[in-house]
Amino acid sequence: MEKRPGIALVWGAMGTWRMLAHRAVGGVTAGFLLLAAPAMAAESPAELISGFRLKHGEVRVVRDATLDRIALEQARAMAAKNDLSHAVLGPFTRRIAPARAGRAAENIAYGYESFEKTLGQWIDSSGHRKNLLLHNASRVGIASARDASGKRTYWAMVIAGDYEPKPHKGKRNKEPLVAVKREAAPASGLKSSGCRIKVLSLCI
């Protein structure tokens, strides 16, 4: 089964975005996920992610309905267009807004049918690994979808935290908040808008 390198996307608490391309060993990696947990599964996707986080000093995450929906929409859109891209449904800043999180990151991938193997590829990629270990993350959304042929599975994972930021009395938010987005070079067989750096002024 074909696997492709992927892209990791992360949004910092102050609105700073970073997108990093990494070639994982023997698999595809990128950034988003929604997977229905089997009734008798030994470990759910959230538990697998939490286990990895706990080993590295971070707290557990739980499944979140809003993040699941965001991840599912992303996975379905990538599968429908056969396009491994964070931008297939528009900017992540807009897509993640309904979650009302202070910080968030997303991983996407295609190739493996199981979440456990996909997670292993992300762990082996430094950018995706950092997203999995997002500091103060407490919720996660995971999804997968197959393309029209039924032979390629796309994955999306959204992880988020800082849902209750401390208010700064008497201080206004710093403006502008700047997001930097870097897209990876096109991979063989995938649609891509090419390499570019885009700087957006955000007011979140």
Image (tube, rainbow, N blue to C red):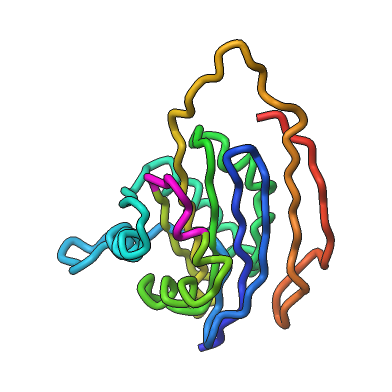
Total marks placed: 0
Using the image, determine if residue 64 lies above or below residue 134.
Answer: above
The reply to whether residue 148 is in sight is no
Using the image, determine if residue 147 lies above or below residue 91.
Answer: below
Please give the name of the residue rendered at 65% of the width and 50% of the height, measured from the top-left corner.
89
Q: Which residue lies furthest to the top in this view?
A: 170
Q: Where is residue 85 in the image (x, y as percent from the top left)?
A: 66, 63
Q: Position of residue 69 (x, y in %)?
A: 45, 46
Between 30 and 129, the one lying in front of the other is: 129
Q: Where is residue 173 in the image (x, y as percent from the top left)?
A: 66, 23
Please give the name of the residue rendered at 67% of the width and 45% of the height, measured from the top-left corner.
16
Q: Residue furthest left?
A: 40
Residues in magenta, as a range: 131-139
Please give the name of the residue rendered at 50% of the width and 60% of the height, measured from the top-left corner.
156
Residue 94 quadrant? top right
Left or right: residue 159 versus residue 60 is: right
Q: In which quarter of the image is the C terminus?
A: top right
Q: Position of residue 68 (x, y in %)?
A: 42, 49
Between 141 and 77, the one lying in front of the other is: 141
In the rendered image, residue 138 lying in the magenta stretch gets the answer yes
In the rendered image, residue 41 lying in the magenta stretch gets the answer no
Between 51 and 157, the one lying in front of the other is: 51
Residue 13 quadrant? top right
Please give the name of the residue rendered at 75% of the width and 50% of the height, measured from the top-left corner.
180
Left or right: residue 45 versus residue 1 is: left
The reply to whether residue 186 is in sight is yes
Using the image, determine if residue 69 lies above or below residue 78.
Answer: above
